[in-house]
Image (cartoon, helix red, strand yellow):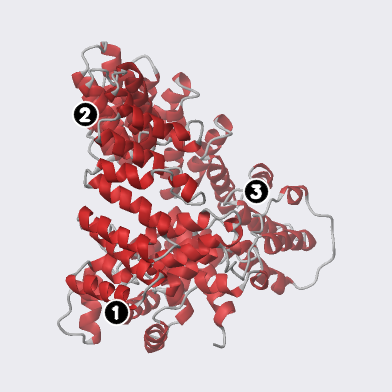
Amino acid sequence: MAQQLAASRSAAAYSGVQTYAAAHPGEGAAAAYMAIGHAYSLDHRYGDAGTAYRQAAGAGNALQDYATYLGAQAALQNRDGTTTVSLLNGFAGKYPGSIFAASAPVTQAQGYLLLNDSSGALRSLGSQIGQPASQKADYLLTEGRAHEMAGDKAAAAAIFRQIYVRLPFSPEAAQARTELQSMNAGPSAGERKLHADALFNAKRYAEAGAEYHAIEQNDQSLGQADRDALEIYAAVCDLRLKHLSHRDAEKLPQTGDDSAALRLYILAELARNDGDEAGNRSLLQQMEQRFSQSRWLEEALYSSGNMYLIKRDAPHAIEVYEELFRRFPNSTYGPSSHWRAAWLSYRLRNYPEAARLMEEQIARYPTSAEAPGALYWRGRLYEEPEKNFAQAVNFYTALSDGYRNFYYALLARERLRMMGPQGTVAPAFPLGEVRTPPAPTLVQELPENDPHLIKARLLANAGLNDYIGPEIAASGSSSQWGALAQAEIYRSYGENVRALQTIKRSGSSFFALPIAQVPNVYWQLLFPRPYWSDLTADAAQNGLDPYLVASLIRQESEFNPSAVSRANAYGLMQLLPSVGKAQARRVGLKRFSTGDLLQPSINLQLGTANLAQVLGRFGGQPEYALAAYNAGDSPVRRWMAENNYKDIAEFVESIPYSETRDYVQSILRNREMYRQLYAGQ
């Protein structure tokens, strides 16, 4: 009921939870009143929220710190400074283990500011001096406002400036800028430029471009050189947003600093977009001559290499990728550029060079995402053409042992089965550099008496989902069991999507371990089977492997029936409305509407029918069909037309779109995981 109340906040939901509170005195009532207070806060009924939180505090003990702190927050939103300050007096002493112990002084200080008591605010904040909380944006903004209220404008401005420049993505950054402007204290053009640069690096191009333009046009203290540079910075944002024309780019000013390299990069990108290889190459040469260490040359080289990769021009792609990792050995693009040069050498059948680069890949980038592929394909080269079968076994074995359930480990074991026993030989040098992902420490039994776990479960009962993770993380031993506990809590009230996401994003390298070494509960959370009855029935109706369907859904929507993508694809199997309509007509489903795709049963019925058709168009070959499901039929047909792949694994690695290649490999790996986990069930 609490989860429903948080989602709908209807009169019936409020009434249901109120009735529950009356019938379940003690901790049950406390959780119910917490749910009501939370819902009132979401509805901006802060006075009613405060009343509900007081009732929660009086009904039970386990969530008293939440009732007190959230009650103070409600009072603050209701502009009741007296209640805010009163509730939080001595909070840390009363609730020393609370996750709010560090933030309560900030909220109390904000209450003091409502009372025009700057000394009280600074006194409250003083308890956190030297602590991590004192570097957070909400603390700093409150501290700055307290100094401003006390008349210390210089101290206030310094703090606001720190927020604006050092914490540009916080909500408080905009407020700090407003405060500086109201004090006529900035921010300066240089500070605004740093702020805009941070936005650009975070790929928030619209905001960054607007700021570059604003600085250029409105700051009268700037010289022409600075204005010219800002115009170019704004232009690269327009380029990223696909708003920049050739005419506008050609008009960009000539400058003498690194913005000149950026101007050339912009022109090179436009040439690439137009398919003008000669123009792109000429601009790269200019950058290499004039700006040999610029980050924009690094970006331009990677972009140019990708252009040739997509155009299937392997020689030029290799040339550019090699130039990139030669000039910029520590580039974030280094591992992928190096691997692409190695792979394209293999595709050109320049096997000695491919072997050299693959061994170098393993040695130079042992923890990169490309390392398993390098191990596999170097093994293939040992197997054929070198006929060194014993060394091939060494590579396949290292891959299988170190990356147990990775896509390439599955292929390596297939090769080992095909080859059979071989003689032994000392491992080649790069195998000594292999660095497999660290094995996680996993527990199966949760510490049932841990107070933070107990509170987290109560929070779930109260519908306070946003606090479940932080509460669990507050336990000193949660690194071993926290992800499992959080996922189990989500699953307990039907939030299978959040449960899956919690385990996937826990940072543990589950796929590096044999299945038997990971407690089964983790695998069940990682590979769930919601809607299994409908899924298996629809898969059988269309002649599909249900584990392939489940793996595709896991990749497409993580089993979220309400998922809608940026490409306007809907539901579990991410169907476009046009595809859904066509399949509905084909299977005889009448009165179809786009909203029907958000119903799991309909999405599965139409999605499996569509997947069967895609497989049929590609001869039943899952690798082709999955690539087409992600990238469309036409690109896959073009890639297939080359018709010079030794086997299907070579086709998959040759997919030029990274997203599509990873998509195909992930689904095929996950299909095998489903088979191993649930075969015979």
Vertical placement of 71 versus 526: above or below? above
Q: What amino acid type should be assigned to the residue bearing mark 2?
A: Asp
Q: What amino acid type should be assigned to the residue bearing mark 3?
A: Met
Image quarter in which the C terminus is found: bottom right
| Left or right side of 391 for 486 | left
> From where the camera sits, is residue 403 visible?
yes
Badge nearest the viewer, 1 or 3: 1
Earlier along the polypeptide chain: callout 1 or callout 2?
2
* Residues under numbered marks 1 and 2 in contact, where contact means CB atoms less than 8 Å apart: no
Query: Badge 3 is on which residue?
Result: 358
Name which quarter of the figure residue 22 lies in. Answer: bottom left
Q: Secondary structure at mark 2?
A: helix
**Cα gap from disc 1 to disc 2, whole angstroms:** 47 Å
| Left or right side of 326 for 105 | left
| Number of numbered callouts drawn | 3
> From where the camera sits, is residue 278 visible?
no
For the view shown, which residue lies furthest in the left direction? 591
